[in-house]
Each structure stands twice: as structure tokens, then as C-alpha cells.
Amino acid sequence: MCVREAAVPFEVLWGDADPSGLIYYPNVFHYVAQAESALYRQLGYTVRAMIAEGFANPRVHVEADFRKSLWVHDTGTCRVWVGRIGTSSVRLDFTLTKDGDSEPAVTGHLVTVFVDPVAMRPIPVPEVLRQAFDAKERAGAGGLTEIEESTESDAGLT
């Protein structure tokens, strides 16, 4: 099974906004986490299942660009997709697009590093996930990008 993306609906609620009524920026990552979780659940993985199989995937880098305003009661879709597979890391790109808009309000990406959950040391991306994300990606992934190398190092994971 090849799974490369997932999408979930979102609604900016009162508790997700700052006093002006705009989305409070860290709440974007709440929606991204929901979409990421949906991606892994399509493959049969929850956090508990990953840990039971001997791996976890903490975030070592997150980045977002806010291109349009999201206000209280705005609804839309948060989409995540596999941007790149490294040796021990996966980059997920994401967008949040308001219903009725053709351009995203928020774009960004996050990098996770697969680790042994006890030692918290990097391990290769589990083969079952690598194959599920797309066998074509495996042939082109010669190693980590500069960002992934620096974030793994900065996080103490190399």
C-alpha cells in the first residue's frame, strides 16, 4: 500500500484564536498533528503501536509561513504529505486552506527523526514505513538534507 498524504478538516474555534479573533499561531500545529496522525493511522500506526514496534518519531524542526488570515469560525482542510525520506528522517509538508480559497492560508513543513524510544538515538526509517510512503522515494534518498543534518545534530540525535 502506498500512502503519501492525508487531509483532515479544521475549524478555528474561540479557544484557537488570540484576542483579536485570528488563529493563535501554535494552534496551526494542532491541526497539522491531526493530519499527521491520520497519515500514520492509514498505515495502521498509532503512537503506541510505533513504540511497541521499537520506534518513535519526535519532531526536530517545524516551520510555517502564514500567507492569509484565519479567523474564528473559518473552516478548511489541513493537508500533509511526504516531502522527503532521509536515512532516519521524514519531512512532511503541509498546507491549511480555507474553504472556498484556492491558495493556502498557511504552508510549512516538519521534520521527524525516527529513534529508539528507550535510547532516544536515531535509527533508520522503518522499512515498512519507507515502502508504504513510496518505494520510488527510496531510490532517490541518498542521505539527509542540510536542514535535516543540522536539526538532528542540534537536537542531540546524531
Image (cartoon, rainbow, N blue to C red):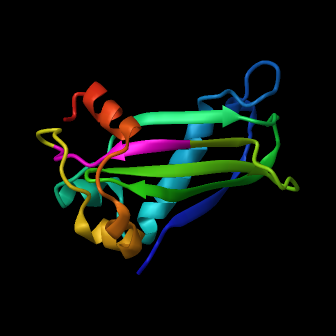
Residue that appears at 53% across and 43% down:
109
Residue 76 horizontal/vertical position (percent): 76, 53
Considering only vertical position in the picture, is 105 above or below 128?
above
Which residue is at the far left?
A: 119
Q: Nearer the viewer, residue 48 or 153?
A: 153
Residue 68 horizontal/vertical position (percent): 81, 36
Considering only vertical position in the picture, is 135 above or below 157?
below
Is residue 112 inside the magenta stretch? yes
Q: Quadrant of the C terminus?
A: top left
Considering only vertical position in the picture, is 82 above or below 69?
below
Q: Quadrant of the N terminus?
A: bottom left
Q: Is residue 138 left or right of residue 54?
A: right
Residue 59 visible from this viewpoint: no
Residue 37 visible from this viewpoint: yes
Residue 74 horizontal/vertical position (percent): 82, 44
Is residue 100 inside the magenta stretch? no
Q: Is residue 86 left or right of residue 80?
A: left
Query: The magenta stretch spans which residues?
Result: 109-117
Residue that appears at 75% across and 50% down:
97
Q: Nearer the viewer, residue 139 or 93?
A: 139
